[in-house]
Amino acid sequence: DKIRGIGYNILNCANAHGRSLGMQLNYTLSLSKELNRLDLTFEVDGVMLKNYWFRIVMDEQKIFNDKMHAHSFYEIHLCLKGWARFWVDGKESVLHAGELAFVPKGKRHQISDISDDFEKVVWGYDLSQGEGAKEPPELLEFYRSLTEFCILPIEKTTLSPFALILQNLREKKVGWFECIKLYMYCFLLEQTRLVLRSDFGKNREKPLLKSG
């Protein structure tokens, strides 16, 4: 079998020449686990970003919480393959490949079922005002206003920062840890643009980021 579509860029970041597909999958999963052992709490543009988890779920790693629960931080589920069924506020929503589910902090949610081929990137993170900011940054104010669960179609560039995170983790060249922080912030901005370009974000009083 061949990996097609948006998940290919993540596998390709392992740059595992001569490896079988199964070996590439295992290698990429090991990078994902290594990433979660790093202390990735940092400040950029007046925003303190705290990482709780940032991992790939695929193959035999199909671990998900099938109980109704909530987090004290934000969470996104970016579906690479297959589908997952969410229950939020008594309503059912299905996340498909090529889509991203945004779960606001404090929002009770449940993944009740997944397809046999389900694969995703899941990120749990929080944002707060950095020590260098005299007032809450606009990005932080925007996220504080997001209180509804939503599913959005992703764009071709959405996964690029994550692929670059894994590439820097693999190569560990000079400055690799700072590069990972930078690309994690870029991933946040890509996700923010998706929200702003959707119906979910169009009714905001002030545009946060310019589209295009």
Image (cartoon, grey):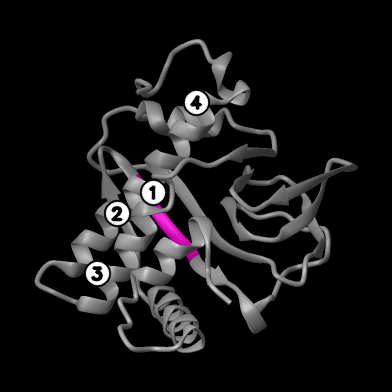
Q: Nearer the viewer, residue 88 or 80?
A: 80
Q: Earlier in the sequence, mark 4 or mark 2?
A: 2
Give the vertical position of 166 relative to 146 (above or below): below
* Residue position for label 4: 196
- How crowded pointer 1 is (Cα within 10 Å; few <14, some 14-19, many 20+) is rated as some
Q: Main secondary structure of the magenta part?
A: strand
Quadrant, the C terminus: top left
Q: Which residues are magenta?
A: 48-53
Please state which amino acid type lies under the numbered disc 4.
Leu
Identify which amino acid the numbered label 1 is placed on.
Phe
Disc number placed over residue 187 in the picture, else none: 1
Which residue is labeled 3 in the image? Answer: 168
Tell me the CA gap for discs 2 and 3. 10 Å
Label 2, label 1: how far apart the Cα atoms are? 6 Å
Q: Nearer the viewer, residue 15 or 68?
A: 15
Query: Residue at left 33%, top 48%?
Result: 185
The residue most toward the top is 205
Identify the image quadrant of residue 17: bottom left
Looking at the image, the residue that sits furthest to the right is: 90
